[in-house]
């Protein structure tokens, strides 16, 4: 029977598929760390209180990248080249979701609208990350090789999502509610299509590595398309609602260190 658990067990059990999985994850996290670091450096003066939280967000993403690199190292594996069609973070940037890298490489201060766009984009993508990590922890939280790592990342993703909710609600109360909802909707509708395309690409590569039969590949592709249809018909709304989180000031203070993964 096909399930998320059985699929991940297959990926985890083969060195080459595990290598690709960890390499894709590490690349995306490292990219997120760089983006947050640049945003923190360019925050406009009126929002300087956000800079330490954005820095913390970036530090967490960098840590996640090192965790995936450490998992590779423990198996004696080198990182794989990430196929461009599986690079979720870069595809989002090319589709105009979030802040363009050309702007982040510059030295000009960001605008208030830029900060709102960053937070809206993060609210959507952190929902995706939190959902995926919750699923992995549910099935593999006690796994001797990856359980501790994914549990740590899951906790961080929950913090990131709480931070996005809180800061967007603060900005909505300051009069930016319509802009926030418009940017959230645009980001969510773009993200669900990109997630579909990247998922199909990743499954294609995994299928070739693991030599899946055509019938299995077809069933998995149909499942990915089914998720997209569900999200396009209304599931995307979970990514745009805003609620004050129970965990307040989730990114306040310095990021905790985990020496075993650095």
Image (tube, grey):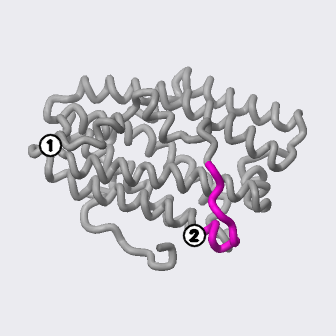
Left or right position of 22 against 186: right
> Residue 205, how many percent across, how many down?
74, 42
Going 9% across and 44% down the picture, which residue do you hit? 46
Between 78 and 8, the one nearer to me in the picture: 78
The residue at which mark 1 appears reads as 44
Packing grade of label 1 (10 A; few <14, some 14-19, many >=20) is: some
Pick the front one: 137 or 200: 200
x, y percent for residue 170: 20, 41
Q: Looking at the image, which residue is at 75% across and 46% down? A: 206
What SS does tag 2 mark?
Answer: helix
Magenta residues, as a range?
A: 70-81
| Residue on which the image places disc 2 | 70
Looking at the rendered structure, the secondary structure element under dot 1 is loop
**Sequence order check, earlier mark of 1 and 2:** 1
Asked if the magenta segment contains residue 76, the reply would be: yes
Q: Nearer the viewer, residue 101 or 199?
A: 101
């Amino acid at each position: 029977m096909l399930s998320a658990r059985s699929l991940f067990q297959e990926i985890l059990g083969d060195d080459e598929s595990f290598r690709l999985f960890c390499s894709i994850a590490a690349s995306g996290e490292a990219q997120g760390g760089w983006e947050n670091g640049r945003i923190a450096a360019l925050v406009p003066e009126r929002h300087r209180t956000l800079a330490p939280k954005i820095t913390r967000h970036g530090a967490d993403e960098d840590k996640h990248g090192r965790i995936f690199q450490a998992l590779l190292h423990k198996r004696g594996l080198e990182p794989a080249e990430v196929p461009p069609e599986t690079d979720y973070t870069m595809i989002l940037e090319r589709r105009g979701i979030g802040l363009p890298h050309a702007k982040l490489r510059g030295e000009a201060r960001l605008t208030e609208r830029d900060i709102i766009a960053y937070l809206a984009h993060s609210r959507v993508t952190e929902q995706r990350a939190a959902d995926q990590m919750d699923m992995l922890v549910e099935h593999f939280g006690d796994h001797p090789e990856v359980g501790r790592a994914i549990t740590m990342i899951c906790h961080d993703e929950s913090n990131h999502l709480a931070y996005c909710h809180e800061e967007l609600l603060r900005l909505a109360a300051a009069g930016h509610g319509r802009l926030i909802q418009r940017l959230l909707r645009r980001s969510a509708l773009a993200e669900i299509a990109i997630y579909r395309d990247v998922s199909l690409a990743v499954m294609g590569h995994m299928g070739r590595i693991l030599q899946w039969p055509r019938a299995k590949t077809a069933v998995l592709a149909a499942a990915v398309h089914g998720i997209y249809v569900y999200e396009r018909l209304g599931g995307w709304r979970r990514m745009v609602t805003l609620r004050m989180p129970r965990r307040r000031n989730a990114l306040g203070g310095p990021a905790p260190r985990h020496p075993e993964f650095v």
